[in-house]
Amino acid sequence: MFAEQIAEAGPRLLASVLEAARLLLDKPAERSVAQQRRDTLQALMSHGEEWIERQSEMLRDACVADRPTTGTGALVASMQGHTQKLMLVDDETVQKEIFISRLSQAIVDVAVWELNDLTTRIAAWKAWTNWSTTTCSGRSSWPRSSFARSSTATSGRTPGPASRRR
């Protein structure tokens, strides 16, 4: 079973974490960061075994539990004919689920916006590079603005700072 293998890997995990903590302690850092690293290493050395034992117990308990604890597990259990008892959920759990939902939605919104922005910029860049490579003249490949054309046509001269302000 996968969870059992993870539970048995606990001592190796603790050894790796302790080694990483020792390596971090040897690296230069600000005083507060170095103190925090020392405290973390001491806490791992004194409570590491207990942490691994509790983690292993929790994994084994989760595997042994009869009832599914996730939405997917509940769906699979209902399809197999197993039903769960309905129970009330405390406010803290509901608030946590709402927070998680809102946070994940905010992350998705930002990611979609960033992807759309990047896609638009790449498309504009491709169009510009395609346009600039097809232009063969030695002049600047950027067209003059319509404002500059209209003011030179009416006055017969290049617009200066005063004429731009009008």
Image (cartoon, helix red, strand yellow):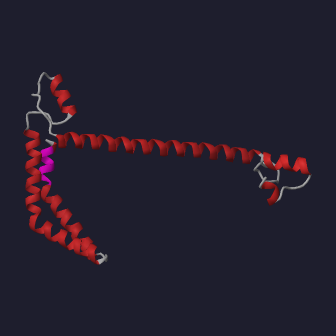
| Magenta residue check for 7 | yes
| Magenta residue check for 98 | no
- Which residue is outermost to the front? 166
Overall secondary structure of the magenta section: helix
Q: Residue at x 84, y 55 (%)?
A: 159
Q: Is residue 17 left or right of residue 51?
A: right
Above or below: residue 39 compared with residue 158: below
Q: Is residue 92 left or right of residue 49?
A: right
Foreground of the two, 61 or 84: 84
Q: Residue at x 73, y 48 (%)?
A: 132
Foreground of the two, 118 or 138: 118
Above or below: residue 19 compared with residue 155: below
Q: Residue 81: name its quadrant.
A: top left
Q: Is residue 64 left or right of residue 101?
A: left
Q: Position of residue 85 (x, y in %)?
A: 9, 28
Above or below: residue 74 compared with residue 96: above
Q: Residue 46: name its quadrant.
A: bottom left
Q: Position of residue 16 (x, y in %)?
A: 20, 63
Q: Which residues are magenta?
A: 3-9
Q: Residue at x 22, y 68 (%)?
A: 21
Above or below: residue 17 compared with residue 28: above
Q: Position of residue 104 (x, y in %)?
A: 34, 42
